[in-house]
Image (tube, rainbow, N blue to C red):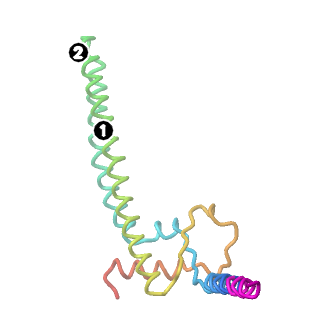
Amino acid sequence: MKNYMNYFLSLGLLIIFGFGFCILDKKQSLDVAVVDMEEMFRSFEMTKEVNGKYTQLVKQHDLKLDSLNKVMTSVHKDPSTNDRVQASNLLALKIKKIQESKDQVKYELEQQIWNQLNQYLGEFGALEKYDLIHGSMNGGELIYVNSTLDVTDEVLMFINNKYNGIP
């Protein structure tokens, strides 16, 4: 009976060690890459296009704000205090809404860019057969990265070609 117990114990340990070595071997063979997400965002063609559109929108909003500020200035010169306060409050509210609108549009445009970047990064990872691509921002998440793992330039070429319809 003891022999069977030792046999099963030895077999169990052998199986556990076997699985352990398989897991360790798999971890050692992971194909890993690192991407500078700030550089990717900044150099992505879509970001440049969207920034151009956003700049035009901001100019339009700024023209509205300038007009409202001129109206507010003329309202402050009006001797009727009650009308001045009401008009001033109404104009301040309109100015606030325009600013909030600019902020909301900027947020939505940036989200579209990040969504597209993430989709293209996934396609790049699958195409190049990476097991893991880590994105770093401000260099804060990673303490050390061997420069051979940095595929930012390759990814930028891939995503910009993809965005521009170049296979």
Residue 104, image x, y percentages: 33, 48
5 part of magenta stretch: yes
Q: Which residue is mark 2?
A: 83
The quarter of the rendered structure image containing the C terminus is bottom left
Tell me the residue at 31%/25% (across/down). 73
Determine crowd level at label 1: few under 14, some 14-19, many 20+ residues with C-alpha closer than 10 A: some
Residue 54 in the image: x percent, y percent? 33, 56
SS for callout 1: helix
Classify 10 Å Cα crowding around label 2: few (below 14), some (14-19), many (20 and above).
Answer: few
Residue 3 at x, y percent in the picture: 76, 88
Ranked by sequence position, the earlier of labels 1 and 2 is 1
- Cα–Cα span, label 1 and label 2: 20 Å
**Residue displayed at 59% across by 83% down:** 30
Furthest toward the front, the residue is 1
In front here: 86 or 69? 86
Residue 26: give x, y in percent of width and height. 61, 85
> Which residue is at 34% across, 62% downward?
112
Disc 2 residue type?
Answer: Asp
Q: Quadrant of the N terminus?
A: bottom right
Q: Which residue matches tag 1?
A: 65
Toward which corner of the image does residue 16 lie, by quadrant? bottom right
| In magenta stretch: residue 8 | yes
Q: Secondary structure at mark 2?
A: helix
Q: Amino acid at mark 1?
A: Leu
Magenta span: 1-12
Vertical placement of 167 versus 140: above or below? below
Using residue 127 as the reference point, say whether residue 96 is left or right of it: left
User: Magenta part mainly helix, strand or loop?
Assistant: helix
Q: Who's the residue at 30% across and 44% down the image?
A: 101
Vertical comparison of 4 with 63: above or below: below
77 versus 156 height, above or below: above
